[in-house]
Image (cartoon, grey):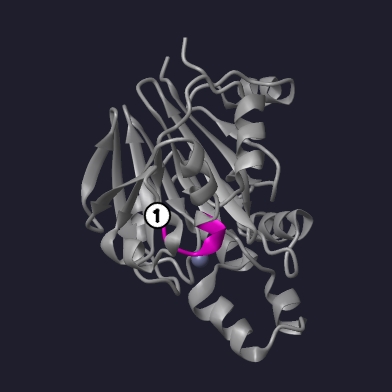
Amino acid sequence: MTEFRIVSLGSSSEGNCFLIVTKEESFFIDLGIGFRDLMRKLRFLKVSSLPSTVLLSHEHGDHTTGIRSFSKKFPITICANDSTFKNLNNAVKNPGVESKIFTTGEVFQIGKAKIKSFPVYHDAAEPVGFTVMYEKHKVVYLMDSGRVEQNTKKEMADADLVIIDSNYDDFSLLQGKYPDTLKERIMCSGHLSNEVVGNLILNHPNPQTEFWLGHLSKEHNSPGLASVTVNYILKYGNGQKKKFKILPRKGIGPLWHPAETRQLEFMYKSGTSLSQP
Ligand SMILES: [Zn+2]
């Protein structure tokens, strides 16, 4: 059985953090939640050994805010490109933090997991998405992106799981009280809307790919709104068989495993051990 598991530890404009567990290593993608919250969730999941590596997509606070407090207690290695490091605040100037700089596009390994970063369109120094490949499985992480480029769509085509930003509802954002400059920033270079993501799922060539929709705005989106919009697009585009889930903003889950997602989701409700046998 493949030992490859992924769980969301929170995904919203207030914080994003994902835990990846493989047989050899476990690591985070982004660390945008506070220490106490993180430890409570790891305890709940019965994680036996603490992850010591973070793949960092970009420098924004909702992806990095937990680094400082975590590294005060435990040693941690941050993997990011040079521009992201240069734009991080004092979070990484801490003796508990080691830096591992990658060049965007380069492939490197954590244990036996192969990691590839790819450029994304977002208003940060040099934001990236990640592809995590383990044995024959592939997960693509694309959080915070103003649009999805062709290369990224290609990257997603044969993925088992795509974790993607579905930040706002178009109507709610346009009618909302944000200043026009901020609305423009969000829509043009910040994030994806439910509608864009719904059409992306509909036109995705692989019906087996599961999509996780995260980073929902508190002001201009809700799990219900995202779900209704995407389901509407899939229904009228004849794509009802496509699979997607809305990530809770602050809660744990869902938990993904290539062979037994349903069982693990059930187990998760009563506390799931992510530790390897
Ligand atoms: Zn961001």
Q: Residue at x 41, y 47 (%)?
A: 140
Q: Quadrant of residue 269?
A: top right
Q: Residue at x 65, y 90 (%)?
A: 180
Where's residue 66, x and y in %?
54, 49
Drawn side of residue 173 relative to residue 148, left or right? right
Where's residue 5, x and y in %?
49, 28
Name the residue nearer the viewer: 232 or 94.
Answer: 94
Q: Which residue is mark 1?
A: 92
State the extent of the magenta-drawn residues as a range: 57-63
Residue 176: in magenta span: no
Q: Secondary structure at mark 1?
A: helix
**Amino acid type shown at disc 1:** Val
Q: Quadrant of residue 1?
A: top left
- Furthest toward the front, the residue is 95
Where's residue 231, x and y in %?
69, 54
Q: Residue at x 31, y 53 (%)?
A: 117
Q: Decide if residue 202 is in sight here.
A: no
